[in-house]
Image (spheres, rainbow, N blue to C red):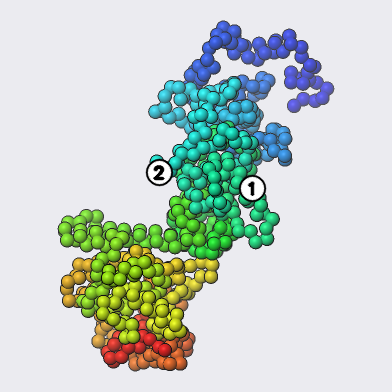
Amino acid sequence: AHPSSVTCERCEQPWSPEEFWEWLRSRHFQRIWDQLKNPRRPLLAESTQFVNNQDRLYKMIGEIGFDVPTGNKQCTFEMCHQAIERFLPTPAFRSLSGRFAYLTRRFKQSSNSFGGWEHERLVVQRVSSYCTNQVDPVSEQVCGKPDPTASSHDLAVSLVDRPIVGHTVGVFSTVESSTCTGSNESIPAFQVIFPQEDPSAVAPKYLVWAHNIFYWNWWHLVPFEVSEPVSVFGLARKAADWEAARRGLANRRGSSILEAKCYSTFHAPWSPAVFLFWLRMNRSADDVGCGTMDKRAGGWFIPLNQVDDALRDVLGTWPIDECRSHQFAKIMNCWRSRYSTQLKLSFSAGSDRAEFLSLQQFEGLVVKKLGDLRVPLSEVAKKIRRTQRRQRILDSVAELIGGKISDSNQDKFIQAIMSDSHPPHLMDISGNKFQVITPAHPVEAELRIQPRYLVWAYDSLRHCRVPQPMWSPGLSVFELAQKACAWEDNGGKIYILTASCYNCGEGSRVHGSTTSCERCEQRWSPEEFWEWLRSRHFLTVYDQLKNINQIKDSRQPRYPSHDLFYDSSTFDRRHWSRIIDEIGFDCPVQREGPTFKMMPAGIVQKFFPTDDDPSFGARYYRWWSNWIRHVGQHPDGFCRWELERLILHKVLRSSSEAGSNISLAA
């Protein structure tokens, strides 16, 4: 800087053409000499003389403006990785110097790097080239190492150090670039923009969202009807209009995944040329949203080792209500509040950033999973549970065979249990056969029944505890479940079905009315029930298939002849845990509350049904609330839900030994 009483070359009196020519020869002598000597030499040839990227960047710094400043740099900063769109003019920033001064606050100091004025000159080069040709000369290719497998022509293009003059047909041809292909061969090709379509710019979030719909074939995520062929720009405009029309509604449906933070951006609207450039240069093939995963940051982070569990948690609790399932932002905010409080997730300044994902990055994974599930958003929770059950089956098979199958008979049973078609017969604990559906009744294959009835029906057939009014020869799981459903629809009550192991909320795992769990989700088909059965009782089903022609099932746990007391030397906690796990849905993961000793067998008589109290669950709750006040806790005892399952077993066994059936009450 200099005082106002003196001048420098940059602020002296206006120049004449002669004075400008004099300055030009002085400032760019070698370049002018080369132009006069070889007027037709390709500009790309100049790039080959630079042996590394830093030489090229210094060359770019010296190519523009007046003479570069001399002297030592006060401080240097890391290479600018800010997206070029951040330096473009906006209503708030019409000055490049102002925008640069604002954004440079994020630069980190680094030794032997670029000074502030050098960064600014590079930004001028980038903005000028981008505004003219939609090409950023300082791309990620420049900042990284050249690809050794690239051809000499590709390297020359990547190292071009001047804006391309003229139309960009050779780089981004309309014919070449307006047609895109999907993520695999089964997805049809699509158009970025039709020739007759309005080429006006569109906000990036809608364009990137629309491209994701086409590229991944995620049409189930489009929250509005599309009745005619559209391009990416056409779908993006429809999304913008659809979202704008709902902003003023008090009870708007929500904007689905358009609300995801991975689509949030401050970029100016994109023209077709800018969007095509983004597709070619900045888009990651496996990523969704604006920008690449490594460029999206935020103030909330989740450790990488917890990402899979977090995804299962948020998707497994996705609302089943058609309206609420589309409120992406609200769902994620509620989940984030609950999950952060539960695990106290945070990112400290001393932590390694590579070990965490930001909220924007995590929401990108959620969007990707919602798309890959390929079901309506109201069915996401059910689909994710089916996916987990299938993975659980595969894990059980891998554990069983130990990585190899040496027995041909074993191979047959493994194939049977991995098949999506249920076997002809299953086996109860006495060696009697029963079926999932009756082949002689084709209508059973079309039945869809609530999960709680199916699980109860399987347990009843498996443990030979079918209520007498429902018994008939050749009774199948689906036939018994249908009878139970009809019984309750007609005002009857099934005593055992009121137990916690067949209903929501066992082990305090309650959920709201807008979400679902495995016990209350939509009705199951025979295929879905067989999937659940293999996942829930893999080893038991495997043994049934192996021992289908034997008299009894050796895996079924037996009760000891004595009652359970903790001073008994024969107490086996693992044995009783197997009995607890034999019935109902999956046991809760955690043991809730205090644990207590087992009571004498005589107390079981109190849980037999009566005419005025046909609910096992209600009776057990009243007994538990009173009983825990009078007994001492035991470190190896049973918690509330464990004891309920044991008592349920004892009630069924006692009723069977007495020759009566107590499973039903009027």
Side of 242 where 432 appears, left or right: left
Identity of the residue drawn at 31% across and 58% down = 394
Q: How many marks?
A: 2
* Res 545 → quadrant: bottom left
Q: Residues within 10 Å of mark 1 (few under 14, many from 20)?
A: few
Q: Above or below — where is 510 with respect to 43?
A: below
Residue 293 in view of the camera: no
Q: Nearer the viewer, residue 452 or 398?
A: 452
**Residue 202 falls left or right of residue 427:** right
Residue 96 coordinates in the image, percent (x, y): 69, 33
Out of 549 and 443, give the one closest to the viewer: 443
Q: Nearer the viewer, residue 18 or 565?
A: 18
Residue 403 shown left or right of residue 407 in the figure:
right
Mark 2 Cα-neighbour bin, 10 Å: few <14, some 14–19, many ≥20: few
Answer yes or no: is residue 31 visible. Answer: yes
175 up-or-down from 189: above or below: above
**Residue 657: which quarter of the image?**
bottom left
Q: Residue at x 74, y 11 (%)?
A: 17
* Residue at numbered disc 2: 186
Which residue position is annotated with label 1?
241
Quadrant showing the C terminus? bottom left
Mark 2, secondary structure of its residue: loop
